[in-house]
Image (cartoon, rainbow, N blue to C red):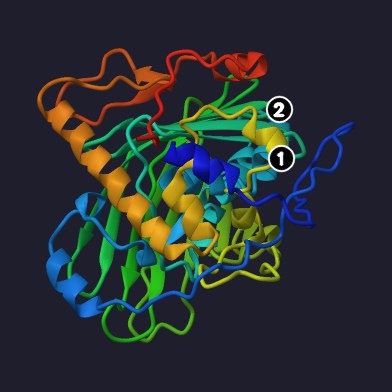
Amino acid sequence: SRASSAQDESPKAMDGSYRTGSGGKGVGSVVRRNRLPLPVEEEKSISLWGLIKSMVGKDLTRVCLPVYFNEPLSALQKVAEEMENSELLDMAAAAPKGSPDRLVYLSTFAVCGYSSSEGRTSKPFNPLALETYELDCPEKGFRLLTEKVCHHPTVLAMHCQGRHWTMTGDCNLKSKFSGSCITINPLGTMQVTFHDGEQFEWHKVTSTMNNLIIGKLYVDHYGTMKITSNGELLAKIRFKEQGFMDRNPHQVKGHVEDCQGNKLAYLNGKWDSCMFSQVDPQSPPVRVWESAPPAQDPTRYNFTSWAITLNEITPDLLSKLPQTDSRLRPDQRFLEEGRYNQANEEKQRLEEKQRAARKIQEDGQQQEPRWFRRKPGCVEGEHVQYEYIGGYWEMRETGKWENIKDIFGL
């Protein structure tokens, strides 16, 4: 099949490593690549104006774009990309239950998940129905699984198990193109449960890509993120919208408060570079997080060192993956290798499969996700939440995948 052909041509891991966070005692270093393969072909120019006119007012999750507009990562891998600074969740787990410190670390984690979007102006691949992505990071102490659980609207669900915490979430990606900018309004809930039972949840803020026609392209995030808990504390984090002549963009300010509204800690910084905390506005700020240095070779996609590793596939990993994993998607693999003609051909073929899947869904034959299910009590017409049903990692250990479809094949 075409999928197996792309697997055979997958590049081997290149020399280099990516190490960050608290690896944990007894956990050895994990060697990961530090650059993408050199492109095989030279990219061709396209008519941007013709595409812009055809997309105005449309939902971009339903628009077919040439592969030139994509980066070699899927939306599922973008979910995993937000786990780069998972050590902040480890630090939150180590903080006392019900303490402001725990919420400071968690809030910082929620903010810095946006850091890798700076300078990223390409679109991730829209996953096929039932497409999955796994990320096993023993050096960081977590395992993550994401799956596209609904095709229209596009809904992604995730489950991530850390040493002393569990993170879950689902996201309905709503995007709109207005002519000069793309606006993305993610509908869904992110949730973290710590080993002592304390639980937090929040919703993501609005994201935009601006100056598509005139000026320098840039990504921005704005709105207020409210992090609530099953305890007595909550956090309110405000992402300031970037102005036309803003010389100090990406600002974030917030605080932790108790149920009486008393402010117990303050947060400020920038979502792309660093965050600081203070006990009160007059106390000296303490740095909680700082972004990693830029990659040696970020390519035209402006990937971070962490992002470069996400689509890597090695022979030992290939033998463990189910055939629904994003790393095995042929058009995405061809784009990473710089085989642009083959990438476009495969993208068109797979999008035809998506249209067929959408028609099946519209005819009432809903494709049920393999690893997640709707949470009990979901009301029809409202945002549907999903939960992990288990069994993925156990089946991976045996190497015998059951009830898995060949979604990338002919």
The kind of residue on which mark 2 rests is Arg
Q: Earlier in the sequence, mark 2 or mark 1?
A: 1
Task: Locate residue 241: give its quadrant.
Answer: bottom left
How many badges with numbers are in the image? 2
The residue sitting at 10% across, 25% down in the picture is: 363
Few, some or many residues within 10 Å of mark 1 (<14, 14–19, 20+): some
- Give me the disc on residue 91: 1
The residue sitting at 19% across, 35% down in the picture is: 356
Q: Is residue 352 above or below residue 71?
A: above
Q: Nearer the viewer, residue 35 or 30?
A: 35
Q: Position of residue 404 (x, y in %)?
A: 44, 20
Q: Position of residue 61 (x, y in %)?
A: 25, 50
Element type at mark 2:
loop
Q: Nearer the viewer, residue 66 or 77?
A: 66
Element type at mark 1:
helix
Question: Does residue 18 appear in the picture of this structure?
Answer: yes
The residue sitting at 31% across, 63% down in the picture is: 66
Q: Nearer the viewer, residue 45 or 301?
A: 45
The residue sitting at 45% across, 60% down in the picture is: 71
Task: Locate residue 208: give its quadrant.
Answer: bottom left
Image quadrant occupied by the C terminus: top left
Q: Nearer the viewer, residue 244 or 162?
A: 162
- Give me the disc on residue 163: 2
Q: Residue furthest right?
A: 26
Task: Locate residue 91: give its quadrant.
Answer: top right
The kind of residue on which mark 1 rests is Met
Q: Is residue 29 above or below residue 363?
A: below
Q: How far, Cα to Cα, is label 2 from label 1?
A: 11 Å
Question: Does residue 262 appear in the picture of this structure?
Answer: no
